[in-house]
Image: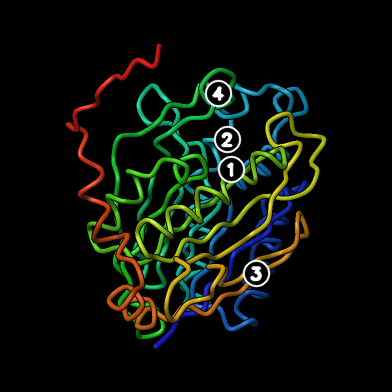
Amino acid sequence: MTINLACAQYPIGQFGSFAAWQAHVADWVDRAVQGDAHFLLFPEYGAMELTALLPAELQQDITGQIAALQDYHDAFVATWSALAKTHDVHIVAPSFPVQVGNVYRNRAYVVAPQGSVGWQEKRQMTRFEREAWIIEGAADLKVFDAVINGEAVRFGVNVCYDVEFPLIAQAQAAMGADLILAPTCTDTLAGAHRVVTGAKARALENQVYVAIAPTVGMAEWSPAVDVNVGWAGVYAAPDRGLPDNGVIAEGELSRPGWVFARLDFERLRRSREDAQVFTAKDWPTQSQPSLDVEAVSLK
């Protein structure tokens, strides 16, 4: 049994009403379903397009707009839940900066067709998030269990920068995750390459599938997500039974649309069991934080 994963290369839109936004995202989901997708991955901070509904002065207030955005939170989650139910698909929705107590956290919602709603909050903050947006990292780390197209799948979510830190995905893989999903938002080609490099490394280290979905294109009206550079991709460890370059699927740079990948988890597990190298099994022996380090002078 396989599942079809759709990764969005998603442009930040500008809408005149919440209903117009709902029609827009419904069209995106419909096009993915027409492509026979069972699981949809949207990017980090895609929810920031809802700030177009705010008064003009708030649209330019990079911190004030996050507080104002909370008024749309419940309807945002309900919209994605309804789409998952209508189309019988699982969705990682565009991440939303959510107020949690006195702080804001970058939250990626995971919605199931049966009505279940989970989330993973970003752990590692970039300088922009920490210094300009005042968004804080979370401590919780989760794996999610789902039955998708008849396949029992355990997966984790690494929100953008998180995928550049190996111990996050390693902990999820140690809990049985075969798939790591990375919604992303990067504004330079260098940033996009950092995320892709991290995704490929996590796939290699843990012998799991890792998928990326970015925001793309220009949104000059938004000071927060004005420039968006990246491409979607799905990666695996280059080893027996998998592509020699580890690339399952990859999109074109900053071109809006869906990138589809067929994920065969039985094939993944067979490859892991009969690999040329056992990176997943050998990794724990190299990752103990208590290793002694000797300083050697070459003077």
Q: Secondary structure at mark 2?
A: helix
Local SS, label 3: strand
Residue 197 left/right relative to 258: left
Q: CA distance from mark 1 to mark 2?
A: 29 Å
Give, as a three-letter code, the residue at label 3: Val
- Dot placed on the residue nearer the N-terminal end, 1 or 2: 2
Mark nearer the viewer, 1 or 3: 1
The mark closer to the camera, 1 or 2, is 1
Measured as percent of width and height from the top left, residue 26 is found at 64, 67
Front one among 30 and 254: 254
Residue at numbered disc 2: 69
Residue at screen point 38% across, 21% down:
102
Image side of residue 162 versus residue 232, left or right: left
Which is closer to the viewer, label 4 or label 1?
Answer: 1
Question: Label 3, on which residue?
Answer: 259
C-alpha separation, residue under disc 1 versus residue under disc 3: 20 Å
The residue singled out by tag 4 in the image is 127
Image side of residue 23 versus residue 294, left or right: right
